[in-house]
Image (cartoon, rainbow, N blue to C red):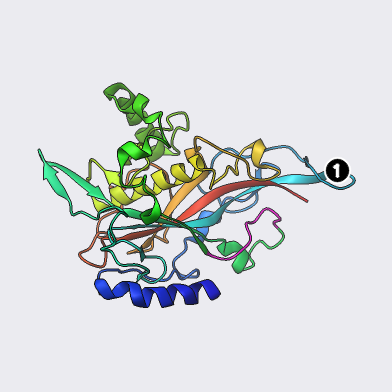
Amino acid sequence: MRWFRCLVAIAVIGTSDSPGKCVGKFVNPITDICWSCLFPITICGLKVSPANEDTSNPGGIICKCPMPIPPYVRIGFPISFWEPARLIDVTRVKFCLVSMGGIQIGADSVRGHGNISNFNTSNTIKKSFYQVHYYKYPVLFWLQLLVQFVCLEKGDMDIAYITEFDPMWNDDETAFVLNPEAVLFGNPIAQAACAADSVAATAGFPIDMLFWCSGCQGSMYPFTGHVPYHVGAVQASLLLTSRMLAKMHRELLAKGTIGKAGMCGQYIMTPMMKTQYKQQMLYPSATTGKGGCKPLGRTSVHWEGGKEKPYTGEDFAYLIWRKRVCCLL
């Protein structure tokens, strides 16, 4: 692909300043993706595939959507499934594309693009900072799976967002322009409510009404790469993955695909509904077994062991599964 050749050419220049720092791997769609996360598939509200964790689905036998040409109405039946649609890198090294095999497309010494710092302790509280990259990844379309589903996202893999070029990502005060409501939730009472979100996410799915919470990982605000309470690299990377999704919705670069509003196409969704997404780790270790993809905010205590490793396991890549409902002709 043309864009990939360009990336390789840039990477040859960009890695000269810091060889060996950027690590990662290309995603193998056959062995690295937990394909059981696609299920359940429902038609007219009835499950027609193996069961799995799921949110509510549209019912009814028929549905209709507007058309720009006669007869101006398209009749179909409601269907729902989970679609692998996005990739997200969480990395300590600037311009390191973890999901692209660990190539670096720029020097990590470039000024003005944030600073990568090691963990520091202040009163025993660890802090960290990461850069995040957001990719479009319509793998179902490439593999021609579920080819009759008109609601599948089409296109090529593409890098949609790189935080190194975002002046708000490394500055909490500048990010206030994007998320001014954060001032309402930076208090003990609002954060105490996140305990309920943690319990709900661990038992099932997070609570959409508590949009300022990211369950067991911490606070969704601010939309920056700073993690003020760093428990572990897995916890921090999961938190920043959730923040990136929320940030994309706030900037209207990600849209809603669930509920009745999503039956006829994607729509503006801000704040983000957390129940629309699941996360699956791809790097440094792909979680492909049962329960390989988890709702946002679920605790990682029972599976994160051995995932964080020196040098090759300090940067992360996640596949984002998106709930999709549509009116299928």
Q: Position of residue 233 (x, y in %)?
A: 26, 53
Residue placed furthest toward the front: 111
Q: Does the magenta segment cover residue 321?
A: no
Front in this rendered view, residue 143 or 241: 241
Q: Is residue 177 left or right of residue 70?
A: left
Residue 56 in which image quadrant: top right
**Disc 1, SS:** loop
* Residue drawn 57% across the image and 44% down it: 255
| Residue 263 appearing in the image | yes
Q: Is residue 179 left or right of residue 51?
A: left
Instruction: Please tell me whether residue 194 is drawn above or below residue 117 in the rendered image.
Output: above
Q: Name the residue under label 1.
A: 72
Residue 132 in which image quadrant: bottom left
Residue 90 in which image quadrant: bottom left
Q: Position of residue 251 (x, y in %)?
A: 50, 43
Number of residues whose C-alpha sits closer than 10 Å to that of mark 1, classed few (under 14), some (14–19) or many (20 or more): few
Query: Hey, what amino acid is under mark 1?
Result: Tyr
Front in this rendered view, residue 167 or 314: 167
| Residue 291 appearing in the image | no
Instruction: Please tell me whether residue 244 is drawn above or below residue 11 in the rendered image.
Output: above
Residue placed furthest toward the left: 123
Number of numbered markers: 1
Q: Main secondary structure of the magenta part?
A: loop
Front in this rendered view, residue 13 or 24: 13
Q: Is residue 29 left or right of residue 229?
A: right
Q: Does the magenta segment cover residue 155?
A: yes
* Residue drawn 58% across the image and 66% down it: 156
Q: Where is residue 327 in the image (x, y as percent from the top left)?
A: 72, 46
* Residue drawn 67% across the image and 53% down it: 151
Q: Give the range drawn in magenta.
A: 149-157
Residue placed furthest toward the right: 70
* Residue drawn 14% across the image and 48% down it: 120
